[in-house]
Image (spheres, grey):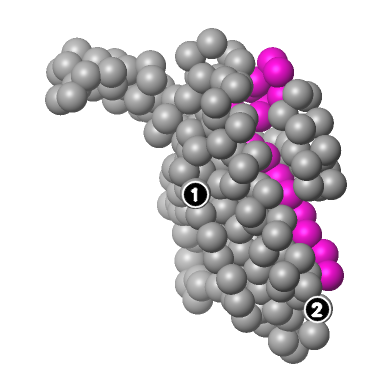
Amino acid sequence: MPTLAAVDIGSNSVRLKVSRLSGRSLREIHEDRQVTRLGDGVFRTGLLTPEAIADTVKVLRRFHRTVQQEGADSVRIVATSAMRDARNSRAFLEWVRSTTGWKVEIISGLEEARLIHLGLVSTLRVTAAPVLMVDLGGGSCELTISSQGHIRETVSLPLGAVRLTNEFLQHDPPARRNCGVCAALWSGRLGGFPTASHDPAPRG
């Protein structure tokens, strides 16, 4: 039975999941997660900070040891919003490769949405009616309308929790005005996305 591993390098946390293929289903054998806030500096200055890089690489080295111990036959490592935006992403990629041998794949927002959709429809019982799937990450938010296991509409928006906190919510409690501006930004970005009750042309 093949053993598969997946690593998600997000803007707020890094995740590892190792599963074993049994028939047509996956059985999870290991899961790990660590908050490193890789995108914190990116959303302020456009650059990954040395501290965030070092913390994330340390976690990835631990994940690498786990993947080897579990005897994974295949591993996919993807990075999302923070790495899409960072001007110094190459330095991070080279550091990861030199310490683990892993080649990190920086995926687009639409590919991120596709993978989220694939994970949900493969593990959840989804009704025949159109379903709105929302994934709020540290740097982006993916919205997908799914119907009978197929994507009908999808969009990735730069509206993640870390990104918006840095930009609008710098006080605790946040200022009412900042909350209003943040909410208006959300409304403006979501205005063009169809609701699940609409009937857009299927994408396959």
Image quadrant in which the N terminus is located: bottom right
Residue at 51%, 54% in the rendered image: 33
Q: Which residues are magenta?
A: 73-89
Q: Is residue 99 left or right of residue 139?
A: right
The kind of secondary structure element at disc 1 is strand
The kind of secondary structure element at disc 2 is loop
Q: Position of residue 53 (x, y in %)?
A: 61, 30
Q: Position of residue 57 (x, y in %)?
A: 65, 39
For the residues marked 1 and 2, what is the alpha-carbon distance in whole angstroms?
26 Å
Eye-nearest disc, 1 or 2: 1
Image quadrant in which the C terminus is located: bottom right
Nearest to the observer: residue 20 or residue 81: 20
Q: Is residue 32 magenta?
A: no
Q: Position of residue 134 (x, y in %)?
A: 46, 48
Label 1: few (<14), some (14–19) or many (≥20) C-alpha neighbours in 10 Å: some
Nearest to the observer: residue 116 or residue 34: 34
Q: Position of residue 103 (x, y in %)?
A: 83, 43
Label 2: few (<14), some (14–19) or many (≥20) C-alpha neighbours in 10 Å: few
Nearest to the observer: residue 176 or residue 84: 84
Q: Are marks 1 and 2 in contact (CB under 8 Å)?
A: no
Residue at 83%, 38% in the rendered image: 98
| Relative to 13, residue 124 above or below | below
Residue at 48%, 66% in the rendered image: 129
Q: Is residue 103 visible?
A: yes
* Amino acid under disc 1: Gln
The number of discs equals: 2
Residue at 65%, 56% in the rendered image: 63
Q: Is residue 8 left or right of residue 124?
A: right
Q: Which residue is tagged 1?
A: 34
| Relative to 85, residue 30 above or below | below
Which mark is drawn over residue 2?
A: 2
